Image (cartoon, rainbow, N blue to C red):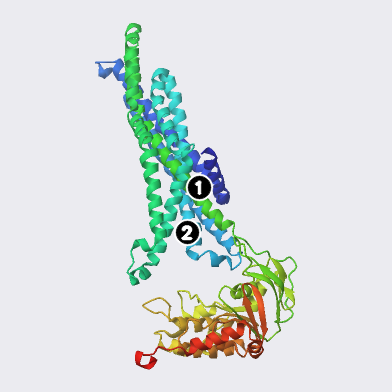
Amino acid sequence: MKEKKQNAVTALLEYAGNYKILTFAGLTLSAISMLCSIVPYVCIWLVARELISVLPDFYKVLNVETYGWIAFGFAVLGIIFYFAGLICTHLAAFRTAENIRKIGMAHIMKAPLGYFDNNASGLIRGRLDSAANDTETLLAHNLADIVGTIVLFAGMVILMFIFDWRMGIACLLSAVISIIAMFSMMGGKNAQLMADYQAAQDRMTKAGTEYVRGIPVVKIFQQTIDSFKTFKKAIEEYSDKAEYYQGKVCRIPQAVNLTFTEGAFIFLVPVVIILVPGALQSGDFIDLVTNFIFYAVFSAIISTALAKIMFASSGIMLASTALKRIDLVMKAPTLKNCHDPQIPKDNSVVFKNVSFTYDGSSLPALSHISFKAEAGQSIALVGPSGGGKTTLASLIPRFWDVDEGCVEVGKVNVKDIDQHVLMKQIAFVFQNTKLFKTSILENVRIANPDASYDDVMRALKAARCEDIIEKLPNGAETILGSEGTYLSGGEQQRIALARAILKDSPIIVLDEASAFADPENEVLIQKALSVLCKNRTVIMIAHRLSTIVNADKIIVLDEGHIVEEGTHQELLDKGGLYHKMWNDYNQAVKWKITSEKEAL
């Protein structure tokens, strides 16, 4: 348990950077605040001693007012120091969370684009942004409370043993029992139970989010929660762990903890009863009564201090879990940029004996792939689903780096080309288009931030987007997603094509650009593609075989291997896999719904 706390705090302080000094300043001020808070209790003891010593002649009291002002002054000082300490720790916490986000974003900006295929934006945000928020409580409050409470305990122990060590031991006995009870709940073998409990809670939250997103599908098919077994299982797992941990592991220790911390006073009574006879004989009865009053009042601090420790410990556990999620982002693979970058000599694309396997997979996605796309050629990639088409195309812009062999662009290994130069060489149009919640103008201009308004409008015109612009209330300045302004899948695809046209890259990678378009949009998309692909090297992934019959070369992939290669007619003449796919495609195109009468 101690090691986990140290690791969490140390890791967070590394992210704090120059603001680490604010954390230490806040902890120091919190410690001073706790020391100041002890003084009023000492003053109470002094007042009680003086009042008892002059009984019943209270007019002889001389220092009560002085003690009262001292208590008030230190109480105010304690509040001021604590407030100042919290300002420091909060500033440090906010800046640390900011640094975590900045460092995390800077790191994932260096990750290959393929990383984002397996790590959705919501997952990354949950790991980075939400986890950064979880660390704020530890730095802003918990650390200050822990340090302050430790100092408070140290001061308490000293005072308790100064006035009467026997009553001091009686008071501390309740603290010892409480600490043992808390350790039995959160330490030793139960520390893992707490971690499992937190993990089950995280899984339930994640499964719940997925279930909510899938509610439309569940409602369409009239299913119940049982249809989403992952969510149901996550709820049951969390329920079981919560019931076991809270009901069995924590029930008795927590009852003992609360009983003895809230009832610390009970340990003083037998001690006083034992000490009274001796005090009466020695004449120290008044001192005994005074000390008893002091310890009775002072024992109330114990429950407050121990409660702070318990809540602070849970904050450290939460921060430790958050740091693990942050580490998942910080450990994301990064693309290594070359030290001596080279410039591509032309627009050719060459695969030389390329093999690639995804992390965690035992089978290669691509195995010993070799082919060449000359500058200006159009290459079509076809084959069964899962054959490796998208993986092959993603290796050109270094979405992933190859395991064996090399990919060359312009006769230069892509690993030897500066990443910014490589990305300028290639334009992409994917099946799933991503548009930002901003104007159409800015959505297109993101491909070339220096482009003028006229340049963007020409790109939109070339992408056959005139009808989209005309129907929108503010034309190209219309903000997407606002006031019910949304585009269909085919319309979004044309906006994406306008981006690619504005980027004006010599190499185009198309991943079934018209897959989700209706017939009307598909015609417009094909016209836009003819403009985009003119005089450029094109790598096209296609499922609609009719769109690639004029490609310079068709490469047929199956299970990560090139099984056929040639023009459309050459592949038909071979009578292999492509020939079968072509026949299946034509059958699918001719398929239509018929009435029972027509079928007869």
**Residue extending farthest front:** 600
Q: Where does label 1 land, which residue?
A: 320
The answer to whether the residue labelled 2 contacts the one labelled 1, judged by CB atoms less than 8 Å apart, is no
The extreme top residue here reads: 281
Q: Is residue 334 left or right of residue 303?
A: right
Front residue (pair 382, 529): 382
Q: Quadrant of residue 563?
A: bottom right
- Residue 553 in percent (x, y) is at 66, 85
Residue type at the position of mark 2: Gly
Q: Is residue 462 visible?
A: no
The answer, for residue 299, to whether it is visible in the render is yes
What is the three-letter code of the residue carrying label 1? Ser
Find residue 46 and report its horizontal and vertical position in percent: 35, 22
Residue beneath disc 2: 126
Apparent side of residue 526 relative to residue 213 in the rendered image (left or right): right
* Quarter residue 271 falls in: top left
What separation in Å lies between label 2 and label 1 (alpha carbons)?
15 Å
Disc 2 residue crowd, few under 14, some 14–19, many 20+, Cα 10 Å: some
Q: Is residue 50 above or below residue 330?
A: above
In the picture, measured across the screen, residue 400 lies left or right of residue 251, that is right
Residue 162 versus residue 255 in the image, above or below:
above
